[in-house]
Image (spheres, coloured by chain):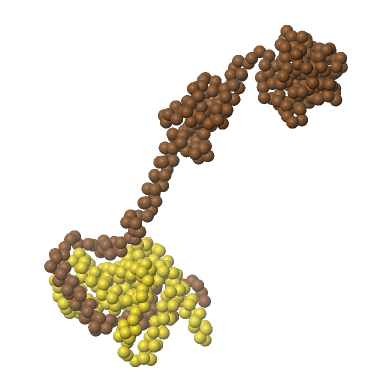
Chain colours: A brown, B yellow
Amino acid sequence: VTARLELSDEQIDDVFAESSVDYGELALFIRRVKATFVEAPDESVERRHVEAMLAFSRSADAEGRGGAHLGSSQWAAEARPAPWRPFGASFMFQLAVALLAVVVLCSGLAVTGNLPDPMQRVAAKVAERFGITLETPHERNERGVDKGGGSNSAESRTDRDDGGYRPRTKGNGEATSNEASEAHRRGSRSVSEKLHPPPGKPEARASGKPDAQGSPSGKPEGPPEGKPEGPPAGKPEGPPAGKPEGPPAGKPEGPPAGKPEGPPAGKPEGPPAGKPEGPPAGKPEGPPAGKPEGPPAGKPEGPPAGKPEGPPAGKPEGPPAGKPEGPPDNP
Amino acid sequence: VKVEEGFSSVLEAARNGSEHAWISLYRRFAPSVRGYLRSRGAAEPDDLTGEVFLQVVLHIERFRGDESDFRSWLFTITHHRFLDERRRLRRHRDEPAPDELILARASVGDAETDALRQLQAADIRSRIAALTPSQQDVLLLRIFGGLAVNEVARILGRRPGAIKQLQRRALEALRRDLTKELKKGA
């Protein structure tokens, strides 16, 4: 059976018109269809229909039929059935209106920064692509602290983009969370320390906090002081841990800055590697606490802990190592 | 009054409320309309036929055209009334008709002839039902309405090219089906 019908459009018209040309089984089928279904209604049905038509025609005449005459191209549209409308209006129209309302609502909330944090973050990212700066949740928290805590200082604003800063008009600045306060305090402190570093104070306070093993957690590259082959304790780039005019760290009577087998310098209970007020152990411009060729820092009788080029031996935030009044913990 | 003698005069007489004109129009076109509705499987083809002609009566004043236009207009109304009825039946499930009504409407002719006719009608309906709905629309409007491609395109709201493609595919499917049966019979 060939699937392709090898008939032209004119021949197909002939098939439907039941022309005398024999088109095979198709023409036969069409003839059968007509013969089977085309049948005049019963007389009773015809009579009923005609009576109804006449009555309808008379009543229509009485009511006054009229109106513009339709051309043959217009009545097709007129005879079309009414479109199906489930709720009185187009469903797509209602859906579009609902979507538009949601978009407008979300946009308004995003601009005022009142969306939930994850949504606000996403909205800010999306808007940033179009050059629109929206408030991020972080900024919102900061602003809440600024308004509520009254510490709207210049330092606290140096971390954020001033272009995106918008004063909140809602007046709920007092709604500050503990988390936001803490974050703000940290940020302000770090910025102020950067701007005005206290003399003798290590820059990174938190970097020298000891971890569970007793090693300074803030010194990732620094091995414990006192190791013969290791670099000196203390940050290489760190500022001096002690005062420049102080005595050199690693006093003979002071506790050792760290024996090779002893606990690492910087441990809270460990031996102080140098006095805070002493000269920086390893200060580049200070007098070297030990000879370069001398024994490694940390020896009891040796030079002070910290090589000349080494970082300060003192712990950043810990008690000053080798304080005169501090009892040495190192046995 | 024969419609073939002068369609325009019959139409004008129908507009003026002539009973003979309406009877002529009804006898001329009602069998095709009813045949179309029956072939589509309408539940009440007679009632639908009556509704179609009532629509014609209602809008006859606004119609302008010749017999071909009238036929096209008539089948536009028929097709849309059929769609309305099918939509209505989908929404509202019908209750089964009482036996008295079925017996009253049963044909009183020869039982053998009626049985053969019903078998033939069922066979044709099953073949047509194998086509897609669009192909059924095109094929049956062309068969019963005697409409041209452009007229069918206007009724169905599609382009003439699409109608040509639909009718070609419908005929190809029908021919495949018929040839297969002939081979089976052989």
Identity of the residue drawn at 74% across and 9% down? A246
How many numbered circles are shown?
0
Residue A311 in percent (x, y) is at 75, 19
- Figure check: A3 above or below A146: below
The part of the image, by quadrant, that contains residue A238 is top right
The part of the image, by quadrant, that contains residue A276 is top right
Q: Say which of A157 and B87 sits in front.
A: A157
- Figure check: A329 above or below A15: above
Horizontal side of residue A323 vs B152, given as left or right: right
Can residue A250 be seen in this snapshot? yes
Screen quadrant of the C terminus of chain A: top right
Residue A34 in percent (x, y) is at 35, 80
Identity of the residue drawn at 34% across and 57% down? A87
Horizontal side of residue A103 vs A285, given as left or right: left
The residue furthest left is A62
Identity of the residue drawn at 83% across and 12% down? A253
Can residue A165 be seen in this snapshot? no
Horizontal side of residue A289 vs A103, given as left or right: right
Q: Say which of B87 and A88 sits in front.
A: A88
Residue A52 in percent (x, y) is at 20, 75
Residue A285 in percent (x, y) is at 74, 11
Identity of the residue drawn at 78% across and 22% down? A270
Q: Say which of A295 and A263 sits in front.
A: A263
- Figure check: A32 above or below B150: below
